[in-house]
Image: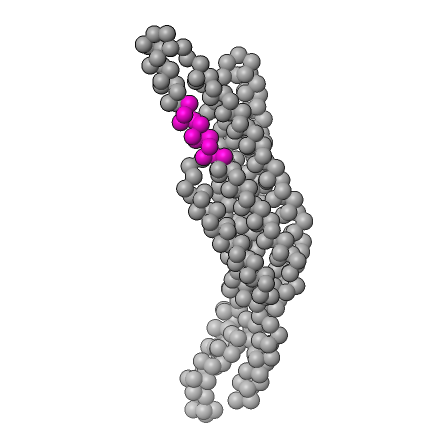
């Protein structure tokens, strides 16, 4: 019984040291790792030539082919950047997980070693209490270790991840510029003459197609802007984590992350409604 009392006191003492609830960190990391719209926009950019090919002629066609070759080569690295950033945040979420540093298997083994005994008057409730207290102690000890590991992870990762996120924003500007050029080429559809009934029919069809393409481009522009803002929010959240990495449980940080997650959810909802 003394052992159980000492174990209980140890659990209380360790609990008072401070165990941060890392739910907000997990939620933030989860949202940051799921920026799938960036990957979609990268793929769309890589397929620009296929969309604009019908409206290109002569020198414009030759230039577009050359640009297409460059995009095919560049897209490989651009997707790697996205995948690496996503993996970074996925690992952060795993580090902040409830069971990342779990000793459940060992605790189960410990529990099985303690049995109800008439000789020692140990009853079932003592056996169950032992398992619960062992869980409290281990999770509390490891929570401090968990926070140290996350702090180390964020400390090492802040500079490179901020550089990568800034690079992703720069690439979005390139996508936007390519989109503007693509829209300009749709203008050929408005050059049909209307001298004969056949011309007027062709002009009407071309005008409808031009309107469709412009609408699609507008949707893509909205998606580009939303993804850019999401990256800004992700970068902001990581900087806040870096600044508070030695005190991950502070209320102000948790409130900031919670607010950022809500903003990222709103942006994701917007992205889900935009075709692009």
Residue 95, quarter of picture = bottom right
Question: Is residue 61 magenta-colored?
Answer: no
The furthest residue to the front: 195
Residue 27 coordinates in the image, percent (x, y): 51, 57
Report the label total.
Answer: 0
Q: Height in image: 64 above or below 118?
A: above
Is residue 85 among what the camera can see? no
Q: Residue furthest top?
A: 195
Q: Is residue 137 above or below residue 159?
A: below
In this view, the residue in front, 206 or 107, is 206
State the quadrant of the C terminus.
Answer: top left
- Residue 230: percent from the left, percent from the top? 53, 46
The secondary structure making up most of the magenta span is: helix
* Percent of width and height locating residue 164: 62, 43
Residue 89 visible in rendering: yes
Magenta-drawn segment: 210-221
Question: How is the rendered protein coloured?
Answer: one colour
Q: Nearer the viewer, residue 274 or 137?
A: 274
x and y percentages locating residue 223 in the rendered image: 48, 38
Near-viewer residue (275 or 215): 215
**Measuring 33% from the left and 10% from the top, which residue is drawn there?**
198
Corner quadrant of residue 123? bottom left
Q: Which residue is painted at 61% across and 68% down in the image?
A: 144
Query: As drawn, is 272 to the left or to the right of 181?
Result: left
Q: Closest to the observer: 161 or 200?
A: 200
Residue at point 50%, 34% (across, down): 221
Q: Is residue 5 above or below residue 19?
A: below
Relative to 185, does residue 109 appear above or below in the rendering? Answer: below
């Amino acid at each position: 019984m003394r052992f159980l009392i000492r174990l209980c006191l140890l659990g209380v003492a360790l609990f008072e040291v401070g165990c941060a609830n890392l739910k907000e960190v997990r939620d933030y990391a989860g949202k940051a790792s799921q920026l799938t719209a960036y990957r979609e926009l990268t793929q769309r950019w890589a397929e620009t030539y296929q969309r604009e090919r019908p409206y290109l002629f002569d020198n414009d066609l030759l230039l577009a082919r050359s640009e297409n070759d460059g995009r095919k080569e560049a897209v490989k690295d651009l997707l790697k950047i996205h995948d690496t950033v996503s993996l970074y945040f996925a690992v952060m979420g795993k580090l902040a997980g409830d069971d990342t540093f779990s000793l459940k298997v060992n605790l189960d083994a410990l529990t099985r070693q303690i049995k109800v005994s008439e000789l020692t008057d140990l009853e079932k409730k003592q056996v169950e209490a032992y398992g619960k207290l062992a869980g409290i102690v281990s999770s509390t000890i490891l929570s401090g270790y968990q926070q140290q590991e996350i702090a180390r992870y964020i400390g090492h990762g802040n500079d490179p991840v901020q550089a990568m996120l800034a690079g992703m924003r720069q690439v979005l500007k390139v996508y936007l510029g390519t989109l503007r050029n693509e829209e300009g080429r749709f203008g050929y559809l408005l050059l049909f003459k209307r001298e004969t009934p056949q011309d007027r029919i062709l002009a009407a069809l071309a005008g409808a197609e031009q309107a469709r393409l412009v609408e699609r481009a507008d949707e893509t522009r909205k998606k580009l802007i939303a993804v850019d803002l999401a990256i800004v929010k992700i970068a902001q959240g990581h900087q806040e984590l870096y600044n508070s990495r030695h005190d991950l449980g502070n209320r102000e940080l948790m409130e900031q992350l919670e607010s950022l997650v809500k903003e990222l959810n709103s942006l994701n909802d917007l992205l889900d409604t935009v075709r692009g």
